[in-house]
Amino acid sequence: MRFPYPPRPLQRQTLGLMERALEGGHLVLQAGTGSGKTVCALYAALTQAEEEDRVVLYLVRTNSQQRQVMLELRKLGPFGIALQGRQRLCLLAEDRHLGPGSADELSHFCRDRKEEVLAGKEGCRFFRGLLEGDGEAMRRWVQETHPTAEEARAHFRAQGICPYELNRVLASQARMITAPYVYFFEPNLRRTLLETLARPPEDVLLIVDEAHNLPAHCRDVGSFRVSAKAVERAEKELMDYGDPEVAEGVSAFDLLEIVAGGLRDLAAEYVIEEDGFLPPLALEGRAMQEFAITTSQLRGMLGSLAAAGEAIREVRRRTGSLPRSHTLGVAQNLLRWMTTEDLAYAKLILGGERPALHAYCLDPSWVAEPIRACHASLHMSGTLAPLEEYRDTLGLPPDTLLRAFPSPFPPENRRVVYRDHVTTRYQELHETPEAMARLRDEVRILLRDCRRNTLFLFPSYRLLESFLDLRRESQVPVFVERRGMDQAALMRSLDAFRRSTAALFAVVGGRVSEGLDFPDRELEVVVLVGIPYPKPTAALRALVRYYDWKFQKGWEYGVLAPTTRRLLQCMGRLIRSERDRGIVIILDRRAPLFKRALGPMVLTEDPSRAIREHLNPPETVRVASP
Ligand code: SF4
């Protein structure tokens, strides 16, 4: 196998580091867009995998990342598979218009249909197509084409063959598998994946792309909720399928009514802004009092509720529907809620129209534990700093290699300036009218002077919405990423923004600030309206407390680290190639706190002038001046 491009000096260094880690360690690498880290990781890992008969597992967050991996693999050659779940690849579920199903529901549905085929009944025609087709021709096509999941799906649909089952058959022969994160971090899916690969974890060389997303992903996998919406669905299900007793004189519906009422009351009592801490047994105590029962009797009732849910699921299964039961889901999560005592969980109540219990997983390291069972792992992103926090949060070993490479683009192409008389500090902004007036003035002037495509990023929709009236004073069109906007409408706005000289209002952490590219003149100025600290929710307070206890670094790991990564993400929209030139204006006096991670920044008295000076080279200014 040959490296497919003439390697640049930075890529040689990257390859060297990766090869060292792949001998049996872990590497956390920050390297920006344009550094070629995807092809370096694939080349280094595949070379080692071929020498030592291992398998490369390349984890991605989005379909476009997975596509990029397959495109690079085509240049390298080895046999690779792009795995996706049944949610995307089950052709029968699509034909029968079954709607969105969970991985577990589709797995049961699929198993039944395959058993029907094997028993000589109709079952799934795509599975029959797989059994009766020319397996060697299928394998050859996949091996030679290196298809993306979408390409494989389209190709095999036309032949009446199930791409999901075919992938599972071929995966054990592949040298590289690329799959969404969830396939490795959700315990049931990981078990299936390793069975499919027919490999122990020690044979796996793991690559995590866009790794800055991994801690939050692992927290999500470890967390769970019981929402009023789920309880409503379960109640409706009981009305449709029957309402059995869960204890003498208590029906399943009665029990769910207590839960629904408890959620509403607890939300009213404990939620501040969007969530709140719950005292021990807050919900359980209500049910125990209402029915005059003990904790173990309540568990018994929930066990009966789960049994009622299983019966519903069985009925649906027999009729060929997705084997789903909301009643079962609510019962299982309530039982889990009652038995979750771990320090690594915060028990919260979420507010809003439909409140929810939220068991928030504070420690993603136990979800990430399987990483340590792999032979080696490479974690890569353009925005991973601070690297120590990433290593510690995920529980990677202390000897993990940590490296941050500078951007491969000329550093003088990007300038960062900040204003020191404004801030979005919550108390100041809400308690001092002059603070808000000063911030609005800054945005007003920047809109008035806007001559370059400018992205204004606000820390929240609420703040963004309070600036919308300033659009009237703008000389250029102002597009807005609105709360809950559908994807097509957002793309239309972005297309219009890219084609004109305009401003765009969006939020940090939204779809615009992460993952979208604006090359060349499509974006030349990013205005950060304040530092995007996480909201001071109960969940955040619990996280800070936990990291104080575990690392004595609550503020650094709970607040500063995610804020730094958000800032890096926002600023990353600006420079995507060697030719790009751009300027970042930070409207917050707290900006210098992040100098170490963001690089040089200077104070400015006049942001509009700073923009002109950076984006108009001096010769141009002279020629353009009267
Ligand atoms: Fe769906 Fe494939 Fe299973 Fe058929 S065999 S039910 S198409 S996943």
Image: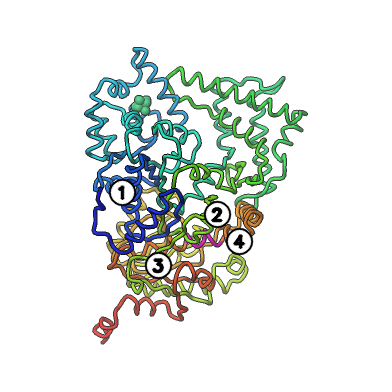
Image vertical order of residue 152 relative to residue 272, above or below: above
- Sequence-first tag of 2 and 4: 2
For the residues marked 3 and 2, what is the alpha-carbon distance in whole angstroms? 32 Å
In the picture of the structure, the residue carrying the numbered disc 2 is 392
Q: Tell whether position 561 is magenta.
A: yes
Residue type, label 2: Asp
Residue range in magenta is 560-566
Instruction: Say which residue appears at 60% left-offset and 41% top-offset.
Output: 356
- Sequence-first tag of 3 and 1: 1
- In terms of depth relative to the viewer, which is nearer, 205 or 569? 205
Residue type, label 1: Gln
CB atoms at circles 2 and 4 under 8 Å apart? no
In the picture of the structure, the residue carrying the numbered disc 4 is 555
> Residue 464 in the image: x percent, y percent?
48, 61
For the residues marked 3 and 4, what is the alpha-carbon distance in whole angstroms? 27 Å
Ligand 1 position by quadrant: top left
Residue type, label 3: Val
- Sequence-first tag of 3 and 4: 3
In the picture of the structure, the residue carrying the numbered disc 1 is 68
User: Which is more foreground, mark 3 or mark 2?
Assistant: 2
Residue 109, quarter of the rendered image: top left
Query: Tag 2's secondary structure?
Result: helix
Mark 4 surroundings: few (<14), some (14-19) or many (≥20) residues within 10 A: some
CB atoms at circles 3 and 1 under 8 Å apart? no
Query: Tag 4's secondary structure?
Result: helix
Query: Tag 3's secondary structure?
Result: strand
Residue 599, quarter of the rendered image: bottom left
Total marks in image = 4
Mark 3 surroundings: few (<14), some (14-19) or many (≥20) residues within 10 A: many
- Sequence-first tag of 1 and 2: 1
Q: Tell whether position 391 is magenta.
A: no
Could you tell whether 371 is left or right of 147 in the image?
Answer: right
